[in-house]
Amino acid sequence: MKLEELAAAVRDGRIDTVMVGFPDPFGRLVGKRFRAGFFLDSVVSHGTHGCNYLLTVNMDMDPLDGFKVANWDAGFGDFVMRPDLSTLREIPWHPGTALVLCDYAREDGTLVAEAPRSVLRGQLERLKAKGWHCESASELEFYLFNQTYHEAFASGYRDLRPSSDYRIDYHLMQPGRDEALMRAIRNGMAAARVPVESSKGEWSRGQHEINFTHDEPLAMSDMHVLFKQGVRELAVQHGKAVTFMAKYAPSEAGNSCHLHLSLWKDGRPAFWDDASGAGSGLFRAFLGGLLRYCPELCLLFAPTINSYKRYQAGSWAPTRMAWSTDNRTCGFRIVGHGKSFRIENRMPGADANVYLAFAAMLAAGMAGVDEGLDCGAPYVGNAYIDPALARLPSSLGESADLLEGSALARRAFGDGVVEFMVRHARLECEAFGSAVTDWEKARYFEQI
C-alpha cells in the first residue's frame, strides 16, 4: 500500500487506524495504534517512540537486569520507531486498519544493533557488498485447537482439544472441518500482501502448515511475523486457538519453521551450475559454512527452553548435522533444480525469530564462502541413527555457551549483540530452573 493510497483511503473513511510496530527479541510485534490522520500528519515524518525496555523484558513483560542496551541505571528511556513505508499494508481482518513495521533507532538515527531487523539488515548489507541477492521463504507449522485462548488458559493448558481426531498429513477430508478458518487465513493474508501458496494438513492431530511465496529475507521476515500475529487473531475471531510452540506435547510432532534460501547474481541463480546440472562451487562453499557453523549459531534457530524438545530422532526434526538431496532426516535438505535450486534449513522451529534465523544462515554461509569450505558428499541413509555425525545442541544453556564462544558470531553480529542474545537465554534458563513443573508434582508429590 503506497502512502498516497493510504491518504486516499483515510479521506474516504475506509481506513481510520494505523498499527505501528516492530519485532521484539521473541519475534512478537509490539507498538501502538494511531488515529490514521495523526499517523499521516506526524508519524510518517517523525516516527514515534517506544520505551527501550521492550528489548530487555521476558515473555511476561518483566524488565530484566544485566543488559547494556537498556537498564534501570540509565532510566529505561525511549528509542525511535521509524516506519519502513515499504511494509505499509491494509489488514483486512481488522476493519478500517492498516499496519506499518518499523526499524528501532536511536535519536541520532542509527539503528539499535540488538533489534532483530537491525541484525538481519547487517547481514544483507554484507551480502550486497559481495554482489549477491538472496531469495528466501519460510514454511510455518502450527497446531489448531477447538478452544479459545481464554479457555486454554483457564484450564492450565490441560486437556487441549486438537481440531482433528487423527493424523492429517496431506488429507483433504478432515482439514475441511477447519476450512472456514484456513480459507480466511489464505485470503486474508493475500489481501494483506502476504502471498500464500498453499495450506495443508500436517503430520499430527490438528497440525497445519502454510507455505509462502519467496521474497528477499527482510520482506520475507516481515511477512512471517505478520502471518503469525494474523493467524492468532483470525483464530480468535473463529473461536479457536493456535500454538506455534516448537513442541506442545511429547506424543506429537514439533512445529517446524523450515527456511529456504538461495543466492542470485545478475538475475541468475548463483547456487546452480548449468554446465554440470548440479550445485555450483558457491553453493558448496555456502552449504559448507552452514554445516560448520550452524551448531554454534543454534540459539538463533532454537531460542526457547521448549525448542530443544523438538530435536528428537524420528520426529521429522533434525538431530544431527548432515545434508542430502530430499532426505528429511538431515538438517539441510537440498531441493529443486535450476532457478528453484535451494537449501532448506530444517533446524528452526516455529518459535524461532525468523529475522535472526535468516541472519544466522547468511552469516554461516558467507563464512563458508570466505573460508573456501566445501560441504562434502551428500549423506545417504538415516541421519538420526548415525553417531558419526555432529549433534545439534541439546539445551538452551548449551546453545548459549556455544554462541558466547563463537568467533564467527562476534565477527558477524558484534560483541554487544552476541552478549545481548546470550543474556536473554541465560535469564530464560534461570527462570525455568526455578520453576516447579506439573511433571515434578505428578512424580514426587505423593511418592517421594
Image (cartoon, grey):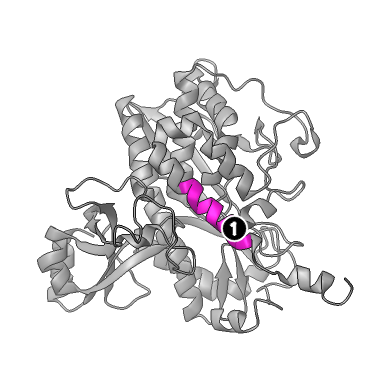
Q: Residue furthest right?
A: 447
Q: Which residues are magenta?
A: 421-432
Confirm whether residue 262 shows in the render.
no
Residue type at the position of mark 1:
Glu
Tell me if residue 322 comes above or below residue 190 in the rendering: above
Image quadrant in which you'd find residue 292: top right
Q: How many marks?
A: 1
Name the residue: 10% across, 67% down: 41
Q: At x 20% / y 63%, what residue is drawn?
A: 48
In the displayed orientation, state which residue is furthest to the left: 41
Name the residue: 71% across, 64% down. Answer: 249
Q: Is residue 199 left or right of residue 1?
A: right
- 123 to 379, vertically: above or below: below
**Residue to which mark 1 is pinned:** 430
Q: Quadrant of the C terminus?
A: bottom right
Q: Position of residue 325 (x, y in %)?
A: 64, 32
Q: Residue 149: percent from the left, percent from the top?
A: 55, 79
In which quadrant of the rendered image does the N terminus lie? bottom left
User: Left or right: 432 with respect to 354?
Assistant: right
Residue 343, quarter of the rendered image: top right
* Left or right, residue 409 beside residue 164: left
The kind of secondary structure element at disc 1 is helix
| Main secondary structure type of the part rendered in magenta | helix
Q: Say whether residue 403 is visible.
A: yes
The percent position of residue 295, horizontal first and vertical second, equals 60, 36
The local crowd at label 1, few if under 14, some if 14 to 19, many if 20 or more residues have their Cα within 10 Å, is few
Please tell me which residue lies in front, 161 or 388.
388
Task: Verify whether residue 95 appears in magenta.
Answer: no
Residue 102 place in picture, x, y as percent:
28, 56
